[in-house]
Image (tube, rainbow, N blue to C red):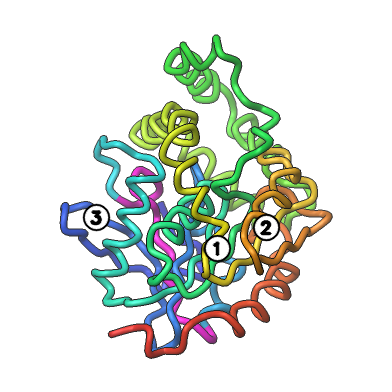
Amino acid sequence: MRCAPALAAFQRTISLPDRTEIFLYDSAGDGPPLILLHGLQDEADTWRHIYGALAAQYRVIAPDLPGFGRSDKRPRAFGVPFYSGCVMALAAGLGLDRFGLIGNSLGAITADAVAAQHPDRVSALVLLNGSLVISHPPASRLSLFQRLFLDYFDRRYFRALRAGTPEAAFETLRPYYADLDALPLADRQFLLERVVARVWDEPQRLAALTIQKGSLPYFLTAGRRLAKRIPSLAVPALVVWGGRDKVFPLANARPRADSQPGARLEVLPDVGHLPQQELPDLLLRTLLPFLNLSVASPAGARS
């Protein structure tokens, strides 16, 4: 899988103590550190349009979460608890005492969990279209029958995609954008390449399936317990939601912002589930003033 051209110069790998190999982009330098976490069935390249602007002021670290992209895909208990541990192990491996977190979708849920568990380590928290507070489930949620036979439906879905055309695979991206056709041609070509690669990536399919199967039990147990810590969370928080998100409804945005005193909510009206891809300049105008006020000084990093 080739890197997005804007990110290629920052690529590296790091091995965690459990020998999990992580592919990441690391702008290095002495700026305050930011860790960027992508969503389900995505990669660190999702940040390609905002990475450079952030790297001008911060040390920006964007990993492929294990199970996805170019990182280790050996079977394990993929999910928010596992990824929270990976974030902390990655921070330790890079010598980061404190860091800002920006997450999208699954990455936002993971960022919320890390902040709830380690508030002393997180200098600022940005949640893009996702959080631990899910009061309105996705409109496309599976029926109970489908959940019971998720493996079967997932295999059938991917068989159909693999038997179809690349254009048919591309069409599966529509729910994630307010207007997929409005993206620049180069972006649409890049996304076509990526979605075709994912369709044929069996280890990644199995990783995503593991997360899907574990999501409901997590939100009913450990996730619910962590969400109860949010009202006392002292980490500066910005909740950003696309007003046309078809994956996680906008109705989830206000409950998360209201649950934490001082948290700020910004709704981007003409954006879907991936604001960092769809309207990156608008997102940056929202992010940068918040980060400039909130993220720790360079003293937060040991390296």
Q: Earlier in the sequence, mark 2 or mark 3?
A: 3
Q: Residue furthest right?
A: 269
Q: CA distance from mark 2 to mark 3?
A: 34 Å
Disc 2 vs disc 3: Cβ atoms closer than 8 Å? no
Name the residue nearer the viewer: 21 or 88. 88
The secondary structure type at the circle numbered 3 is strand
Residue under numbered circle 3: 21
Label 2 CA crowd tier, 10 Å (few <14, some 14–19, many 20+)? many
Can you give x and y, in whole percent of width and height, for residue 96 in the image?
32, 76
Name the residue nearer the viewer: 43 or 30. 30
Residue under numbered circle 2: 257
Can you give x and y, in whole percent of width and height, for residue 157 in the image?
53, 20
Which residue does the image show at 32% across and 46% down from the upper left? 82
Q: CA distance from mark 1 to mark 3?
A: 20 Å
Can you give x and y, in whole percent of width and height, for residue 3 in the image?
44, 61
* Res 210 seen here: yes
Residue stretch in magenta? 56-71
